[in-house]
């Protein structure tokens, strides 16, 4: 009995460190024959060779010295656990840190994540090599299918196609470039709340979403279709003209319902319908939205454009606990509209400190309004088409904002991260001759020489 007991203790001691720390494996498409994955010399050759992974394991992917392509079909990854994911990471070693391209070779998607079958939960794909996106996933219309999943992170990845997250949660997109092929409808579908509603369940940050438009006025693909229980910050959503676009989808940057969403410090450029469209279907409730410190610029104005549009579709709905504040909205047919479609009710909602510069009217029903401006008089930017920091001539904005508790309980900084003064300025940026941008931060500017390419 003592020997049996001792054997069990030894077995437990051997298992626990592996689960806590994880093992390291390797994938290299350049090797001749696939090995067991435990070293570069015996690396797995393709994703189909990967097997036996457990929570906490890390798989290093070789990009060679100048880039390497992995042609693959559907990948059924084992699952990690909360705080202990399975990570697929581009190697940072010299000679192996080139760009990894995962290219479609059969199958309707690359990653198939299915909770009941135990595939693809709590996994991370990380392409960060010295701050560069060195992982590209391409060739599929929908590279990721993850309905109802949880714990999926993409970090420093370029994705050419749609990420499908219907009802998925604990999702993070970090420094991702989503380049949507024309006619794909949405770049990201359906990020959900899971069991408990919270602003921090999911996050999308420091990312770029590029979506096409063309044809009839207002037609184009969407950025996010469904975004719930999330913080969405430091992103750029860019509309790109495609002369061959022939679909009848109205283009929105974010089209969502539900609750608990913060959208702040973002840049929305050249979108053809609504950059932010909060829509309640079937009498649902729109609640707990925070939209602040964003810049909207629409040099190519379509019909019906509203930078922020909030309302009901089909029947009356409740719009409650919504803040739209300190945004800079330049060019466009209309600025901020709340409850202007099918009538519902608005409560506990505030629209404050927004600049609407050549951007039409503010129509917000019974939402409380404070210190917004729809005039160009006394509003002066460094550059009205590329840099919307205030200059000394912005006398109608500098020190003209409110800083009531309904705002200060949510944020106290501007889009650059500078602390707002005792008397807040109107718009996304605080003015100050002594204010400098944080290291590595530059003002957003419209992209140039963009060309659409059909996949």
Image (tube, rainbow, N blue to C red):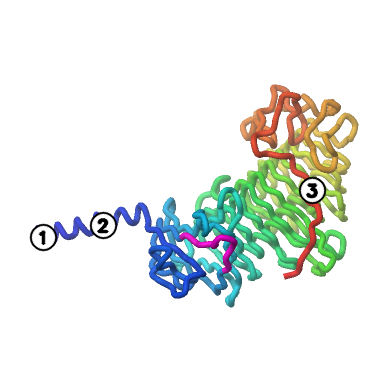
> For residue 206: magenta?
no
Above or below residue 354? Residue 92 is: below
Query: What is the spatial separation of the Cα atoms under label 2 and label 3, in whole angstroms?
Result: 56 Å
Asked whether residue 368 is in view, the answer is no
Q: Which mark is residue 308?
A: none
Q: Residue 150 appears at what percent x and percent y?
A: 50, 58
Residue nearest the viewer, comparing 325 with 124: 124
Secondary structure type for disc 3 = loop
Q: Residue 57 appears at what percent x and percent y?
A: 41, 58
Query: Residue at position x 56%, y 64% from top?
Result: 147
Above or below residue 383? Residue 106 is: below
Q: Which residue is mark 2?
A: 14
Query: Residue at position x 55%, y 45% from top?
Result: 200
Which region is colored magenta?
60-69
Quadrant assignment, res 409: top right
Above or below residue 366? Residue 371 is: above
């Amino acid at each position: 009995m003592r020997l049996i007991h001792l054997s069990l203790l030894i077995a437990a001691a051997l298992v626990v460190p592996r689960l806590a720390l994880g093992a390291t494996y390797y994938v290299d498409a350049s090797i001749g024959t696939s090995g067991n994955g435990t070293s570069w010399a015996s690396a797995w050759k393709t994703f189909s060779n990967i097997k036996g992974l457990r929570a906490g394991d890390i798989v290093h992917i070789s990009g060679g010295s100048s880039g390497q392509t992995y042609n693959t079909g559907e990948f059924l990854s084992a699952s990690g656990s909360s705080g202990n994911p399975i990570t697929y990471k581009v190697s940072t070693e010299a000679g192996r840190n080139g760009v990894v391209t995962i290219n479609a070779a059969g199958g309707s998607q690359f990653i198939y994540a299915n909770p009941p079958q135990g595939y693809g939960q709590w996994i991370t794909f990380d392409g960060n090599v010295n701050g560069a996106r060195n992982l590209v996933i391409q060739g599929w219309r929908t590279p990721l299918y993850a309905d109802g999943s949880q714990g999926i992170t993409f970090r420093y990845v370029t994705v050419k196609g749609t990420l499908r997250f219907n009802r998925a949660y604990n999702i993070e997109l970090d420094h991702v470039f989503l380049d949507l092929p024309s006619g794909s409808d949405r770049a990201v579908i359906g990020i959900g709340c899971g069991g408990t509603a919270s602003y921090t369940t999911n996050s999308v940050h420091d990312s770029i979403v590029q979506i096409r438009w063309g044809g009839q006025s207002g037609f184009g693909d969407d950025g996010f279709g469904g975004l719930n229980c999330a913080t969405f910050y430091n992103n750029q959503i860019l509309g790109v003209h495609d002369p061959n676009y022939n679909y009848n989808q109205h283009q929105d940057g974010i089209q969502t319902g539900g609750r608990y969403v913060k959208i702040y410090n973002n840049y929305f450029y050249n979108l053809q319908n609504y950059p932010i469209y909060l829509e309640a279907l079937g009498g649902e409730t729109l609640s707990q939205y925070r939209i602040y410190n964003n810049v909207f610029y629409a040099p190519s104005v379509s019909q019906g454009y509203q930078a922020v549009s909030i309302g009901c579709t089909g029947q009356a709905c409740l719009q409650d606990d919504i803040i739209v504040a300190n945004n800079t909205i330049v060019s466009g047919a209309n600025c901020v509209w709340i409850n202007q479609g099918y009538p519902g009710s608005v409560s506990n909602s505030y629209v404050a400190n927004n600049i609407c510069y050549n951007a039409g009217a503010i129509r917000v029903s019974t939402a409380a309004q404070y210190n917004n401006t729809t005039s160009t008089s006394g509003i002066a930017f460094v550059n009205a088409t590329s840099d919307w920091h205030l200059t000394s001539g912005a006398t109608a904005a500098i020190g003209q904002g409110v800083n009531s508790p309904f705002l200060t309980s949510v944020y106290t900084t501007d889009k650059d991260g500078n602390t707002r003064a005792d008397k807040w300025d109107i718009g996304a940026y605080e003015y100050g001759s002594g204010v400098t941008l944080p290291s590595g931060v530059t003002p957003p500017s419209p992209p140039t020489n963009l060309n659409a390419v059909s996949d």
